[in-house]
Image (cartoon, grey):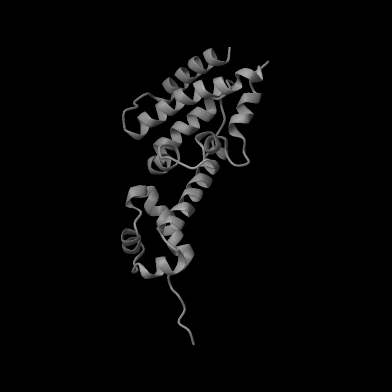
Amino acid sequence: MARKESITREIISEGAFKLLREQGETMLTARKLASYIGCSTQPIFRVYEGMEELSAEMFQKARNYYENFCMNYEKKSNVPFVDLALCYIQFAAAEPNLFKLLFLAAHDDENTMYDLINGKESGFVIKELRRIPNLDMNNAGMIFMKVFVFMHGMACMVTNGEFDLEDNETTDMLVNVISSFIS
């Protein structure tokens, strides 16, 4: 009778994602993960062909986690893009290691920054563009670029601990700046 494997793909995947969230992508090594979940490296390499495969899976888990975060974010603003920007900034604050993996690391052509922010099927950016009255579609890309540069800067400041505005101050700043972009 074959021995039952006690370290499953699910255990490894959940442990890797937890380690990624806590310590960041650079700390996601086979040895650190094995120590973290209490096994040798052998079960990791029995389940995954290599760390590249595990890293790709973690990227997709992080992407899905971000999308779920955005889907569950409470929308409050009547100004297009303000809620998306607030959600993005709050994600950076709540999950700095996932934010760095998704939005501060280089990716392939299938995972552009725009694709990540817009969501797989969610169309977060498209929904916000549709909220702009009388939008000239020739200007849509530039409007998003301006909004993105501003919100991304704020989110990066959050991950570095250099953003000390209160929520209401952040909201007011976003409303003022984004309103100027879309008017």
Q: Is residue 17 left or right of residue 160?
A: right
Q: Tell me if residue 63 comes above or below residue 55 in the rendering.
A: above
Q: Is residue 33 left or right of residue 115?
A: left
Residue 26 location (% of width, % of height): 33, 49
Answer above or below: position of 44 versus 172: below
Relative image position of residue 168 (x, y in whole percent): 44, 22
**Residue at the (66%, 17%) spot, across then down:** 136
| Residue drawn at (65%, 20%) of the image | 137
Q: Is residue 81 left or right of residue 172?
A: right
Q: Position of residue 34 (x, y in %)?
A: 34, 64
Total number of numbered discs in the rendering: 0
Q: Give the image quarter of residue 52.
A: bottom left
**As drawn, 52 above or below 24:** below
Residue 68: name its quadrant: top right
Q: Quadrant of residue 157?
A: top left
- The quarter of the picture where the C terminus appears is top right
Residue 20, percent across and down? Answer: 39, 50
Q: Is residue 105 left or right of residue 131?
A: left
Give me the residue at 52% from left, 12% from top.
180
Of 173 and 150, which appears nearest the observer?
150
